[in-house]
Image (spheres, grey):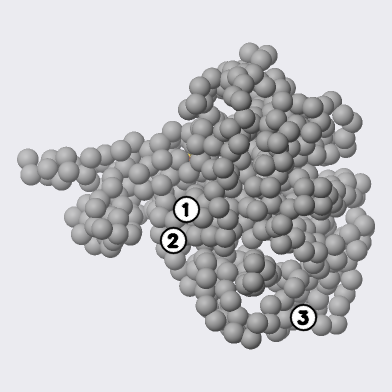
Amino acid sequence: MIARDGSCISLWQDTAEEYQTQNNELKKSFDVAIVGGGITGITTALQLQKAGKNCVVFEAYNLCFGTTGGTTAHLNTLLDNPYNIIINKFGKENAQLVAQSTKDSIELIRSNIEEYNIDCGFQNASAYLYAQDDKQVKELEDIHDACREVNVKAVYQENLPINIDYKKVMRVDGQAKFHPVKYVHALAKAFEEIGGVILQQCRVLDIKENGIINIVTEKGNFQSQYLIYATHIPTGINLLHLRCAPYRSYAMAVTLKNKNYPEDLFYDMYDPYHYIRSQQIKDQTYLIVGAEDHKTGHIENTDECFSKLEAYVKKYFDVDEVVNKWSSQYFEPADALPYIGHLPGHKENILVATGYGGNGMTYSHVAALTLKSIVLNEDNPYIKLYDPNRIKPVAGFVSFLSHNADVARMFVGKWFTHEKLKELEDIAPGEGKVVRFEGETIALHKDKEGKLHALKPTCTHMKCSVAWNNAEQSWDCPCHGARYNISGYVVTGPANMQLQKIEVKELLESTKH
Ligand code: FES
Protein backbone atom coordinates (compact mmCIF):
# COMPACT_ATOMS: atom_id res chain seq x y z
CA MET A 1 0.00 0.00 0.00
CA ILE A 2 1.15 3.55 -0.67
CA ALA A 3 0.67 6.51 1.70
CA ARG A 4 -1.73 9.30 0.73
CA ASP A 5 -2.72 12.75 2.00
CA GLY A 6 -5.56 11.56 4.24
CA SER A 7 -6.52 8.75 6.57
CA CYS A 8 -9.14 7.16 4.26
CA ILE A 9 -7.68 4.53 1.96
CA SER A 10 -8.36 4.86 -1.75
CA LEU A 11 -8.76 1.88 -4.06
CA TRP A 12 -5.57 2.87 -5.86
CA GLN A 13 -3.33 3.19 -2.82
CA ASP A 14 -4.75 -0.08 -1.50
CA THR A 15 -3.78 -1.96 -4.66
CA ALA A 16 -0.29 -0.57 -5.36
CA GLU A 17 3.09 -0.88 -3.68
CA GLU A 18 5.30 2.08 -2.76
CA TYR A 19 7.53 3.13 -5.64
CA GLN A 20 11.17 2.24 -5.04
CA THR A 21 13.56 4.66 -6.71
CA GLN A 22 16.49 3.25 -8.64
CA ASN A 23 19.01 5.47 -6.86
CA ASN A 24 20.50 7.07 -9.93
CA GLU A 25 23.78 8.80 -9.31
CA LEU A 26 22.87 12.04 -7.58
CA LYS A 27 23.76 15.05 -9.69
CA LYS A 28 23.35 18.55 -8.32
CA SER A 29 22.62 20.42 -11.50
CA PHE A 30 19.70 19.81 -13.88
CA ASP A 31 18.00 21.30 -16.92
CA VAL A 32 14.55 20.94 -15.40
CA ALA A 33 13.48 20.46 -11.78
CA ILE A 34 9.93 19.28 -11.22
CA VAL A 35 8.30 19.71 -7.83
CA GLY A 36 5.61 17.07 -7.23
CA GLY A 37 5.57 13.35 -8.00
CA GLY A 38 1.99 12.95 -9.19
CA ILE A 39 0.77 12.24 -12.70
CA THR A 40 1.62 15.75 -13.99
CA GLY A 41 5.14 15.77 -12.56
CA ILE A 42 6.12 12.29 -13.69
CA THR A 43 4.57 12.55 -17.16
CA THR A 44 6.21 15.91 -17.79
CA ALA A 45 9.55 14.64 -16.48
CA LEU A 46 9.45 11.64 -18.82
CA GLN A 47 8.51 13.79 -21.82
CA LEU A 48 11.42 16.16 -21.19
CA GLN A 49 13.97 13.47 -20.35
CA LYS A 50 13.09 11.69 -23.61
CA ALA A 51 13.65 14.99 -25.42
CA GLY A 52 17.21 15.14 -24.06
CA LYS A 53 16.77 17.29 -20.95
CA ASN A 54 18.22 16.19 -17.61
CA CYS A 55 15.36 16.21 -15.14
CA VAL A 56 14.85 15.72 -11.43
CA VAL A 57 11.55 15.20 -9.59
CA PHE A 58 11.30 16.29 -5.95
CA GLU A 59 8.42 14.68 -4.03
CA ALA A 60 7.77 15.65 -0.39
CA TYR A 61 6.29 12.20 0.43
CA ASN A 62 5.97 9.31 -2.04
CA LEU A 63 4.84 9.23 -5.66
CA CYS A 64 1.04 9.65 -5.98
CA PHE A 65 0.72 10.84 -2.36
CA GLY A 66 -1.62 13.66 -3.46
CA THR A 67 -4.60 13.75 -5.77
CA THR A 68 -3.22 11.17 -8.21
CA GLY A 69 -3.68 8.60 -5.43
CA GLY A 70 -7.21 9.85 -4.73
CA THR A 71 -8.69 10.56 -8.16
CA THR A 72 -11.33 8.31 -9.70
CA ALA A 73 -9.29 8.39 -12.92
CA HIS A 74 -11.75 9.20 -15.68
CA LEU A 75 -10.06 10.09 -18.99
CA ASN A 76 -12.36 12.46 -20.82
CA THR A 77 -12.77 14.65 -23.81
CA LEU A 78 -16.22 15.42 -22.35
CA LEU A 79 -15.23 17.97 -19.72
CA ASP A 80 -16.65 19.09 -16.35
CA ASN A 81 -16.71 22.68 -17.54
CA PRO A 82 -18.76 22.00 -20.66
CA TYR A 83 -17.85 23.26 -24.11
CA ASN A 84 -20.79 25.68 -24.29
CA ILE A 85 -19.26 27.49 -21.30
CA ILE A 86 -15.77 27.36 -22.85
CA ILE A 87 -17.08 28.67 -26.21
CA ASN A 88 -18.85 31.43 -24.34
CA LYS A 89 -15.72 32.52 -22.48
CA PHE A 90 -12.97 31.84 -25.02
CA GLY A 91 -14.65 31.54 -28.44
CA LYS A 92 -15.25 28.57 -30.70
CA GLU A 93 -11.74 28.28 -32.10
CA ASN A 94 -10.16 28.13 -28.67
CA ALA A 95 -12.80 25.66 -27.49
CA GLN A 96 -11.90 23.46 -30.48
CA LEU A 97 -8.27 23.66 -29.37
CA VAL A 98 -9.27 22.63 -25.85
CA ALA A 99 -11.10 19.61 -27.27
CA GLN A 100 -8.10 18.73 -29.44
CA SER A 101 -5.76 18.99 -26.46
CA THR A 102 -7.87 16.49 -24.48
CA LYS A 103 -7.78 14.09 -27.46
CA ASP A 104 -3.99 14.51 -27.64
CA SER A 105 -3.81 13.83 -23.91
CA ILE A 106 -5.67 10.53 -24.09
CA GLU A 107 -3.63 9.59 -27.15
CA LEU A 108 -0.40 10.24 -25.23
CA ILE A 109 -1.62 7.99 -22.41
CA ARG A 110 -2.46 5.28 -24.94
CA SER A 111 0.94 5.56 -26.60
CA ASN A 112 2.79 5.53 -23.25
CA ILE A 113 0.94 2.37 -22.26
CA GLU A 114 1.85 0.75 -25.55
CA GLU A 115 5.48 1.93 -25.60
CA TYR A 116 6.22 0.87 -22.03
CA ASN A 117 3.86 -2.11 -21.99
CA ILE A 118 2.10 -0.84 -18.87
CA ASP A 119 -0.30 -3.12 -17.04
CA CYS A 120 -2.65 -0.53 -15.53
CA GLY A 121 -6.10 -1.82 -16.49
CA PHE A 122 -6.47 0.80 -19.23
CA GLN A 123 -9.74 0.40 -21.09
CA ASN A 124 -11.50 2.47 -23.74
CA ALA A 125 -14.99 3.53 -22.74
CA SER A 126 -17.89 5.77 -23.69
CA ALA A 127 -19.17 8.60 -21.51
CA TYR A 128 -22.91 8.92 -20.82
CA LEU A 129 -24.31 12.22 -19.64
CA TYR A 130 -27.96 11.96 -18.63
CA ALA A 131 -30.63 14.53 -17.80
CA GLN A 132 -33.28 13.74 -15.20
CA ASP A 133 -35.58 16.76 -15.39
CA ASP A 134 -36.63 19.34 -17.97
CA LYS A 135 -34.07 21.93 -16.92
CA GLN A 136 -31.31 19.36 -17.26
CA VAL A 137 -32.65 18.30 -20.67
CA LYS A 138 -32.16 21.87 -21.90
CA GLU A 139 -28.60 21.93 -20.46
CA LEU A 140 -27.87 18.56 -22.01
CA GLU A 141 -28.99 19.81 -25.42
CA ASP A 142 -26.72 22.86 -25.10
CA ILE A 143 -23.79 20.65 -24.16
CA HIS A 144 -24.55 18.25 -27.02
CA ASP A 145 -24.62 21.06 -29.58
CA ALA A 146 -21.42 22.61 -28.20
CA CYS A 147 -19.63 19.24 -28.28
CA ARG A 148 -20.43 18.93 -31.97
CA GLU A 149 -19.19 22.47 -32.61
CA VAL A 150 -15.78 21.57 -31.16
CA ASN A 151 -15.62 18.21 -32.97
CA VAL A 152 -16.32 16.03 -29.96
CA LYS A 153 -18.81 13.56 -31.39
CA ALA A 154 -21.79 13.54 -29.06
CA VAL A 155 -24.86 11.51 -29.98
CA TYR A 156 -28.26 11.11 -28.34
CA GLN A 157 -29.03 7.62 -27.23
CA GLU A 158 -32.36 5.93 -26.49
CA ASN A 159 -31.33 4.03 -23.39
CA LEU A 160 -29.07 4.49 -20.40
CA PRO A 161 -27.23 1.21 -19.78
CA ILE A 162 -27.50 1.52 -15.97
CA ASN A 163 -30.64 1.29 -13.90
CA ILE A 164 -31.15 4.98 -13.08
CA ASP A 165 -34.11 7.14 -14.17
CA TYR A 166 -33.42 9.53 -17.06
CA LYS A 167 -35.19 11.86 -19.44
CA LYS A 168 -32.53 12.24 -22.10
CA VAL A 169 -29.13 10.63 -22.65
CA MET A 170 -26.06 11.72 -24.58
CA ARG A 171 -23.09 9.50 -25.41
CA VAL A 172 -19.51 10.40 -26.32
CA ASP A 173 -17.09 7.67 -27.40
CA GLY A 174 -13.31 7.78 -27.17
CA GLN A 175 -13.03 8.12 -23.38
CA ALA A 176 -11.04 5.77 -21.14
CA LYS A 177 -10.24 4.62 -17.60
CA PHE A 178 -7.19 3.12 -15.85
CA HIS A 179 -5.38 2.51 -12.55
CA PRO A 180 -3.58 5.86 -12.12
CA VAL A 181 -0.96 4.78 -9.57
CA LYS A 182 0.16 1.74 -11.58
CA TYR A 183 0.40 3.94 -14.65
CA VAL A 184 2.47 6.64 -12.92
CA HIS A 185 4.79 4.10 -11.30
CA ALA A 186 5.50 2.57 -14.71
CA LEU A 187 6.26 5.99 -16.21
CA ALA A 188 8.53 6.78 -13.24
CA LYS A 189 10.49 3.59 -13.91
CA ALA A 190 10.80 4.49 -17.60
CA PHE A 191 11.96 7.99 -16.61
CA GLU A 192 14.66 6.64 -14.29
CA GLU A 193 15.81 4.10 -16.87
CA ILE A 194 16.76 6.89 -19.25
CA GLY A 195 18.66 8.81 -16.58
CA GLY A 196 15.96 10.81 -14.78
CA VAL A 197 16.26 11.32 -11.03
CA ILE A 198 13.42 10.98 -8.51
CA LEU A 199 13.89 12.09 -4.93
CA GLN A 200 11.05 10.95 -2.66
CA GLN A 201 10.66 12.18 0.95
CA CYS A 202 12.36 15.33 -0.27
CA ARG A 203 10.41 18.53 0.35
CA VAL A 204 11.50 21.66 -1.47
CA LEU A 205 12.07 24.27 1.23
CA ASP A 206 13.11 27.34 -0.72
CA ILE A 207 13.70 28.56 -4.25
CA LYS A 208 16.03 31.35 -5.25
CA GLU A 209 15.47 32.73 -8.73
CA ASN A 210 18.66 34.27 -10.09
CA GLY A 211 18.67 33.24 -13.74
CA ILE A 212 19.81 29.80 -12.71
CA ILE A 213 17.40 28.52 -10.05
CA ASN A 214 18.81 27.46 -6.67
CA ILE A 215 16.63 24.90 -4.96
CA VAL A 216 16.93 24.20 -1.24
CA THR A 217 15.49 20.79 -0.28
CA GLU A 218 15.48 18.41 2.65
CA LYS A 219 18.19 16.44 0.79
CA GLY A 220 20.51 19.30 -0.02
CA ASN A 221 20.78 22.11 -2.54
CA PHE A 222 20.35 21.79 -6.30
CA GLN A 223 20.45 24.00 -9.37
CA SER A 224 18.26 23.99 -12.44
CA GLN A 225 17.57 26.02 -15.58
CA TYR A 226 13.80 25.53 -15.27
CA LEU A 227 11.51 24.73 -12.38
CA ILE A 228 7.99 23.33 -12.78
CA TYR A 229 5.43 23.33 -9.96
CA ALA A 230 3.43 20.14 -10.44
CA THR A 231 2.12 20.33 -6.88
CA HIS A 232 -1.52 20.84 -7.83
CA ILE A 233 -1.25 24.43 -6.60
CA PRO A 234 2.08 26.25 -6.27
CA THR A 235 3.53 27.02 -2.87
CA GLY A 236 4.24 30.61 -1.83
CA ILE A 237 1.80 33.43 -2.36
CA ASN A 238 0.65 33.86 -5.93
CA LEU A 239 -2.08 35.26 -8.12
CA LEU A 240 -3.15 31.70 -8.91
CA HIS A 241 -4.29 31.23 -5.31
CA LEU A 242 -6.93 33.82 -6.07
CA ARG A 243 -7.85 32.22 -9.38
CA CYS A 244 -8.27 28.65 -8.13
CA ALA A 245 -10.78 27.47 -5.52
CA PRO A 246 -10.06 24.22 -3.64
CA TYR A 247 -12.80 21.55 -3.55
CA ARG A 248 -13.11 18.09 -2.07
CA SER A 249 -14.88 15.20 -3.72
CA TYR A 250 -15.93 11.86 -2.19
CA ALA A 251 -15.58 8.42 -3.74
CA MET A 252 -16.42 4.85 -2.91
CA ALA A 253 -15.34 1.50 -4.39
CA VAL A 254 -17.83 -1.32 -3.88
CA THR A 255 -18.34 -4.87 -5.06
CA LEU A 256 -21.72 -5.96 -6.44
CA LYS A 257 -23.64 -9.12 -5.60
CA ASN A 258 -25.02 -9.46 -9.13
CA LYS A 259 -21.59 -8.73 -10.71
CA ASN A 260 -23.35 -6.40 -13.13
CA TYR A 261 -20.53 -3.86 -13.46
CA PRO A 262 -21.06 -1.16 -16.09
CA GLU A 263 -18.15 -0.88 -18.54
CA ASP A 264 -18.57 2.80 -19.37
CA LEU A 265 -18.45 6.19 -17.62
CA PHE A 266 -21.67 7.80 -16.33
CA TYR A 267 -22.47 11.32 -15.16
CA ASP A 268 -25.73 12.83 -13.93
CA MET A 269 -26.32 16.57 -14.11
CA TYR A 270 -26.84 17.63 -10.51
CA ASP A 271 -24.51 20.11 -8.87
CA PRO A 272 -22.46 18.46 -7.49
CA TYR A 273 -22.95 15.60 -9.92
CA HIS A 274 -22.55 11.84 -9.41
CA TYR A 275 -19.93 9.98 -11.44
CA ILE A 276 -19.85 6.25 -11.93
CA ARG A 277 -17.48 3.73 -13.48
CA SER A 278 -15.89 0.36 -12.81
CA GLN A 279 -12.32 -0.93 -12.70
CA GLN A 280 -10.97 -4.42 -12.80
CA ILE A 281 -7.88 -5.00 -10.65
CA LYS A 282 -6.48 -8.54 -10.91
CA ASP A 283 -9.49 -10.87 -10.56
CA GLN A 284 -11.81 -8.40 -8.86
CA THR A 285 -14.00 -5.72 -10.43
CA TYR A 286 -15.08 -2.68 -8.43
CA LEU A 287 -17.81 -0.16 -9.00
CA ILE A 288 -16.48 3.34 -8.26
CA VAL A 289 -18.95 6.11 -7.52
CA GLY A 290 -18.16 9.70 -6.58
CA ALA A 291 -20.07 12.88 -5.61
CA GLU A 292 -20.83 15.21 -2.67
CA ASP A 293 -18.21 17.81 -3.69
CA HIS A 294 -17.84 20.91 -1.53
CA LYS A 295 -15.35 23.68 -1.01
CA THR A 296 -12.44 22.51 1.13
CA GLY A 297 -12.88 23.33 4.81
CA HIS A 298 -16.52 24.35 4.43
CA ILE A 299 -18.08 21.18 5.89
CA GLU A 300 -17.02 19.91 9.31
CA ASN A 301 -18.91 16.62 9.37
CA THR A 302 -17.34 15.17 6.26
CA ASP A 303 -18.42 11.66 7.35
CA GLU A 304 -21.91 12.70 6.35
CA CYS A 305 -20.73 13.10 2.75
CA PHE A 306 -19.83 9.40 2.76
CA SER A 307 -23.19 8.48 4.33
CA LYS A 308 -25.06 10.30 1.56
CA LEU A 309 -22.87 8.77 -1.12
CA GLU A 310 -23.33 5.27 0.30
CA ALA A 311 -27.12 5.73 0.39
CA TYR A 312 -27.00 6.78 -3.28
CA VAL A 313 -24.89 3.81 -4.34
CA LYS A 314 -27.12 1.35 -2.45
CA LYS A 315 -30.24 2.87 -3.99
CA TYR A 316 -29.14 2.08 -7.53
CA PHE A 317 -26.74 -0.86 -7.24
CA ASP A 318 -26.80 -4.30 -5.66
CA VAL A 319 -23.92 -3.61 -3.26
CA ASP A 320 -22.16 -6.55 -1.68
CA GLU A 321 -19.36 -4.77 0.18
CA VAL A 322 -18.02 -1.24 0.49
CA VAL A 323 -14.31 -1.89 0.00
CA ASN A 324 -12.84 1.65 0.00
CA LYS A 325 -14.10 5.13 0.64
CA TRP A 326 -11.95 8.19 0.33
CA SER A 327 -11.97 11.87 -0.57
CA SER A 328 -9.67 13.93 -2.68
CA GLN A 329 -8.92 17.53 -3.58
CA TYR A 330 -9.09 19.44 -6.83
CA PHE A 331 -8.78 23.10 -7.80
CA GLU A 332 -11.51 24.78 -9.80
CA PRO A 333 -10.21 27.55 -12.11
CA ALA A 334 -11.93 30.97 -12.20
CA ASP A 335 -12.67 30.83 -15.93
CA ALA A 336 -13.14 27.11 -16.76
CA LEU A 337 -9.65 26.39 -18.16
CA PRO A 338 -6.51 25.22 -16.34
CA TYR A 339 -3.44 27.40 -15.86
CA ILE A 340 -0.43 25.81 -17.56
CA GLY A 341 2.74 27.73 -18.29
CA HIS A 342 4.67 30.63 -16.80
CA LEU A 343 3.90 31.22 -13.10
CA PRO A 344 2.66 34.83 -12.79
CA GLY A 345 4.94 37.15 -10.87
CA HIS A 346 8.03 34.96 -11.29
CA LYS A 347 10.94 34.66 -13.71
CA GLU A 348 10.20 33.17 -17.14
CA ASN A 349 11.83 29.86 -16.21
CA ILE A 350 9.36 29.13 -13.37
CA LEU A 351 6.39 27.14 -14.70
CA VAL A 352 3.20 25.75 -13.23
CA ALA A 353 0.22 23.52 -14.03
CA THR A 354 -2.91 23.85 -11.91
CA GLY A 355 -6.68 24.50 -11.95
CA TYR A 356 -7.65 21.22 -13.61
CA GLY A 357 -11.14 21.13 -12.06
CA GLY A 358 -12.51 17.59 -12.13
CA ASN A 359 -10.48 16.56 -15.19
CA GLY A 360 -7.05 16.20 -13.61
CA MET A 361 -6.06 12.96 -15.30
CA THR A 362 -6.76 14.36 -18.76
CA TYR A 363 -5.28 17.80 -18.12
CA SER A 364 -2.13 16.28 -16.58
CA HIS A 365 -1.09 15.15 -20.05
CA VAL A 366 -2.21 18.39 -21.68
CA ALA A 367 0.16 20.00 -19.15
CA ALA A 368 2.99 17.61 -20.01
CA LEU A 369 2.66 18.40 -23.73
CA THR A 370 2.41 22.15 -23.13
CA LEU A 371 5.24 22.42 -20.60
CA LYS A 372 7.49 20.32 -22.80
CA SER A 373 6.92 22.75 -25.68
CA ILE A 374 7.69 25.74 -23.47
CA VAL A 375 10.97 24.26 -22.24
CA LEU A 376 12.01 23.11 -25.74
CA ASN A 377 10.94 26.43 -27.25
CA GLU A 378 8.58 24.68 -29.68
CA ASP A 379 5.53 26.25 -31.31
CA ASN A 380 2.40 24.91 -29.66
CA PRO A 381 -1.03 26.61 -29.66
CA TYR A 382 -1.74 25.21 -26.19
CA ILE A 383 0.90 27.56 -24.73
CA LYS A 384 -1.24 30.62 -25.41
CA LEU A 385 -4.52 28.84 -24.73
CA TYR A 386 -3.61 27.76 -21.20
CA ASP A 387 -1.31 30.69 -20.34
CA PRO A 388 -1.73 31.43 -16.58
CA ASN A 389 -1.15 35.12 -17.34
CA ARG A 390 -4.13 35.30 -19.71
CA ILE A 391 -6.58 38.17 -19.26
CA LYS A 392 -9.83 36.74 -17.92
CA PRO A 393 -13.15 37.19 -19.62
CA VAL A 394 -15.27 39.27 -17.20
CA ALA A 395 -17.60 36.33 -16.51
CA GLY A 396 -14.68 34.43 -15.01
CA PHE A 397 -14.48 36.92 -12.21
CA VAL A 398 -17.94 36.16 -10.86
CA SER A 399 -16.88 32.89 -9.27
CA PHE A 400 -13.49 34.41 -8.52
CA LEU A 401 -15.11 37.18 -6.50
CA SER A 402 -17.55 34.94 -4.67
CA HIS A 403 -14.76 32.54 -3.73
CA ASN A 404 -12.61 35.36 -2.47
CA ALA A 405 -15.51 36.77 -0.46
CA ASP A 406 -15.47 33.41 1.34
CA VAL A 407 -11.73 33.78 1.80
CA ALA A 408 -12.22 37.20 3.40
CA ARG A 409 -14.67 35.69 5.90
CA MET A 410 -12.10 33.06 6.86
CA PHE A 411 -9.57 35.72 7.73
CA VAL A 412 -11.86 37.29 10.34
CA GLY A 413 -12.65 33.84 11.70
CA LYS A 414 -16.42 33.98 11.63
CA TRP A 415 -17.10 30.89 9.58
CA PHE A 416 -16.75 28.21 12.26
CA THR A 417 -18.03 28.43 15.82
CA HIS A 418 -15.25 28.52 18.38
CA GLU A 419 -16.24 26.45 21.36
CA LYS A 420 -14.98 26.73 24.89
CA LEU A 421 -12.29 24.41 26.07
CA LYS A 422 -14.61 23.29 28.89
CA GLU A 423 -16.34 21.35 26.15
CA LEU A 424 -13.07 19.56 25.54
CA GLU A 425 -14.43 16.41 27.18
CA ASP A 426 -17.16 16.42 24.52
CA ILE A 427 -14.62 15.68 21.79
CA ALA A 428 -14.97 12.03 20.90
CA PRO A 429 -11.87 10.02 20.01
CA GLY A 430 -11.04 10.68 16.37
CA GLU A 431 -12.69 14.12 16.39
CA GLY A 432 -11.24 17.62 16.17
CA LYS A 433 -12.53 21.10 16.96
CA VAL A 434 -11.33 24.67 16.86
CA VAL A 435 -11.88 25.92 20.43
CA ARG A 436 -11.30 29.11 22.43
CA PHE A 437 -9.31 28.84 25.61
CA GLU A 438 -7.94 31.65 27.77
CA GLY A 439 -8.18 34.05 24.87
CA GLU A 440 -6.36 31.63 22.56
CA THR A 441 -7.82 29.80 19.59
CA ILE A 442 -6.71 26.19 19.41
CA ALA A 443 -7.11 23.39 16.88
CA LEU A 444 -7.71 20.45 19.19
CA HIS A 445 -7.83 16.80 18.17
CA LYS A 446 -8.40 13.72 20.32
CA ASP A 447 -6.82 10.65 18.71
CA LYS A 448 -8.33 7.13 18.79
CA GLU A 449 -6.42 6.39 22.03
CA GLY A 450 -7.86 9.52 23.67
CA LYS A 451 -4.63 11.55 23.49
CA LEU A 452 -5.06 15.25 22.77
CA HIS A 453 -3.11 17.06 20.05
CA ALA A 454 -3.24 20.86 20.08
CA LEU A 455 -2.12 23.21 17.33
CA LYS A 456 -2.41 26.85 16.46
CA PRO A 457 -5.20 26.85 13.84
CA THR A 458 -3.54 29.62 11.85
CA CYS A 459 -2.69 28.34 8.37
CA THR A 460 0.98 29.03 7.63
CA HIS A 461 0.19 30.07 4.06
CA MET A 462 -1.79 33.29 4.53
CA LYS A 463 -3.12 32.98 8.08
CA CYS A 464 -6.70 31.75 7.57
CA SER A 465 -8.13 29.52 10.28
CA VAL A 466 -8.11 25.79 9.48
CA ALA A 467 -11.16 23.54 9.92
CA TRP A 468 -11.38 19.90 10.99
CA ASN A 469 -11.98 17.24 8.32
CA ASN A 470 -13.44 14.31 10.20
CA ALA A 471 -13.33 11.75 7.42
CA GLU A 472 -9.70 12.31 6.43
CA GLN A 473 -8.53 13.26 9.98
CA SER A 474 -6.86 16.42 8.76
CA TRP A 475 -6.94 20.17 9.32
CA ASP A 476 -8.04 21.81 6.07
CA CYS A 477 -7.67 25.44 5.16
CA PRO A 478 -10.80 26.88 3.53
CA CYS A 479 -8.94 29.72 1.81
CA HIS A 480 -6.54 28.10 -0.66
CA GLY A 481 -6.77 24.42 0.26
CA ALA A 482 -3.65 23.75 2.36
CA ARG A 483 -4.08 20.65 4.54
CA TYR A 484 -2.24 19.41 7.61
CA ASN A 485 -2.20 16.05 9.42
CA ILE A 486 -3.04 15.72 13.12
CA SER A 487 0.55 16.54 14.05
CA GLY A 488 0.36 19.74 12.00
CA TYR A 489 2.57 18.63 9.09
CA VAL A 490 1.64 19.85 5.61
CA VAL A 491 0.06 17.14 3.46
CA THR A 492 -1.31 19.46 0.74
CA GLY A 493 0.04 22.82 -0.43
CA PRO A 494 0.14 25.73 -0.93
CA ALA A 495 1.44 25.94 2.67
CA ASN A 496 5.03 24.83 3.10
CA MET A 497 5.41 25.06 6.88
CA GLN A 498 3.74 23.03 9.60
CA LEU A 499 1.12 24.39 12.02
CA GLN A 500 2.57 25.60 15.30
CA LYS A 501 2.30 22.98 18.05
CA ILE A 502 0.80 23.74 21.48
CA GLU A 503 1.62 21.56 24.46
CA VAL A 504 -1.73 20.34 25.75
CA LYS A 505 -0.34 19.48 29.18
CA GLU A 506 1.00 22.98 29.78
CA LEU A 507 -2.22 24.43 28.61
CA LEU A 508 -4.32 22.40 31.05
CA GLU A 509 -1.95 23.18 33.92
CA SER A 510 -2.23 26.88 33.24
CA THR A 511 -5.96 26.71 34.12
CA LYS A 512 -5.07 25.79 37.73
CA HIS A 513 -3.31 29.08 38.42
FE1 FES B 1 -3.90 30.01 1.99
FE2 FES B 1 -4.45 28.62 4.16
S1 FES B 1 -4.08 27.89 2.20
S2 FES B 1 -4.32 30.74 3.96
- Asked if ligand 1 lies within 8 A of label 3, the reply is no
Q: Is residue 72 left or right of residue 302?
A: right
In x, y percent, where is residue 209?
62, 17
Which one is in front, 199 or 304? Answer: 199
Secondary structure beneath label 1: loop
Q: Which residue is labeled 2 in the image?
A: 471
Name, please, the residue furthest toward the left: 513
Q: Which residue is labeled 1 in the image?
A: 6
Q: Is residue 133 above or below residue 495?
A: below
Between disc 3 and disc 1, whose residue precedes?
1
- Within the image, what quadrant is residue 167 found in? bottom right
Q: CA distance from mark 3 to mark 1?
A: 34 Å
Q: Which residue occupies 50% across, 22% down?
A: 220
Q: Which residue occupies 50% across, 26% down?
A: 219
Which one is in front, 329 or 4? Answer: 4
Q: CA distance from mark 2 to mark 3?
A: 32 Å
Asked whether the viewer can see residue 295, the reply is no
Secondary structure beneath label 2: loop
Between disc 2 and disc 3, whose residue precedes?
3
Residue 99, labelled with which disc? none
Q: Is residue 195 above or below residue 448?
A: above
Q: CA distance from mark 2 to mark 1?
A: 8 Å
Total of numbered circles in the picture? 3
Q: Is residue 285 above or below residue 333?
A: below
Q: Amino acid at mark 3?
A: Pro
Contact, mark 2 vs mark 1 (Cβ under 8 Å): yes
Q: Residues within 10 Å of mark 1 (few under 14, many from 20)?
A: many
Q: Is residue 115 left or right of residue 289?
A: right
Q: Which residue is labeled 3 in the image?
A: 161
- Quarter of the image containing the C terminus? top left
